[in-house]
Image (tube, grey):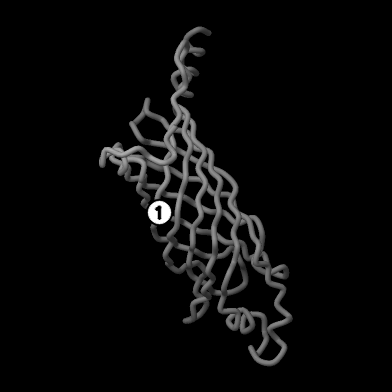
Amino acid sequence: MKKIFYLFLMIFGIQSGSTAQSQWSFGPKIGLGISDVSVTGIDHNSRTGVTAGLFGEYRIQNFALEADFLYANQGFKWNKDAIEENYLLIPLKVKLYMPYILKGLNIFAGPQLDLCIKRNDWIWLLMSGEDGAGTGKQNIPYQNTLASITFGLGYRFDFGLDLAFSYNAGIVSNVKEYSDKNCVFQLTAGYDLCKLFKLCGKKCPLAS
């Protein structure tokens, strides 16, 4: 029983008799996403788009909470056309660092708010049997405020580079009449600017 307890302490980074060390990280993030939808009954394929934005992280020992603010170009391909949708993604992720396996290695998961700011909806009209003209556009019950669950694996290098591979599983449909939930793989690279301040011999604005 005592061995199991000590293993628990090692895994979750709890150090008896020591003060927890906190650390802020923030910086830019950029990457690529492979997106698709879970809609059935039509022939569709995934498409690749750019992801870019900012991240912020607050870490205490091996636990961390990260929030991102990202622009993402998503959608899918239908016939020879690309259904393009632009989103603002705001994930809130709980992270667990696992230095006992590999320094910098971490896993994460959390909810994500997906705000659609633009889409080429004429293709949706064709898919729904409309001709794309007149008032047909009003017959598509779009939902621009969506939600996803994001989870994945990351690695933080000592010099500040942060790599992450994640999967975003949509839980709200793009259109009420369809079950077309977003499915997105993302590969991103970020850089912790607090590390840059330290390398330049300056204090990070977020440092205590």
Secondary-structure class at tag 1: strand
Q: Which residue is drawn at 30% across and 44% down?
A: 196
Q: Residues within 10 Å of mark 1 (few under 14, many from 20)?
A: many
Residue occupying the far top of the picture = 2
The residue lying at 63 percent from left, 56 percent from top is 147
Viewer-closest of 69 and 148:
69
Q: Describe residue 21's horizontal placement relative to residue 161 as left or right.
A: right
Does 73 sit left or right of 41 as displayed? left
Task: Judge whether 101 appears above or below 120 on screen.
Answer: above
Q: In this view, does 72 lie above or below 139?
A: above
Is residue 50 positioned above or below 153 on the image?
below
Q: Which amino acid does label 1 sit on?
A: Lys
Q: x, y (%) of residue 55?
A: 46, 49
**In-front residue for pair 115/205:** 205
Query: Which of 195 and 62 lies nearest the eye of the viewer?
Result: 195
Residue position marked by numbered label 1 in the rendering: 29
- Write the residue at 53% across / 38% down: 94
In this rendering, position of residue 77 left or right of residue 39: left
Q: In which quarter of the image is the C terminus?
A: top left
Q: Which of 187 and 21 is in front in this view?
A: 21
Number of marks drawn: 1
- Residue drawn at (44%, 25%), measured in percent from left and top? 21
Q: Position of residue 186 (x, y in %)?
A: 44, 55
Q: Where is residue 192 in the image (x, y as percent from the top left)?
A: 36, 44
Kindly give the residue lying farthest to the bottom in the view shown: 134
x and y percentages locating residue 39 in the rendered image: 61, 67
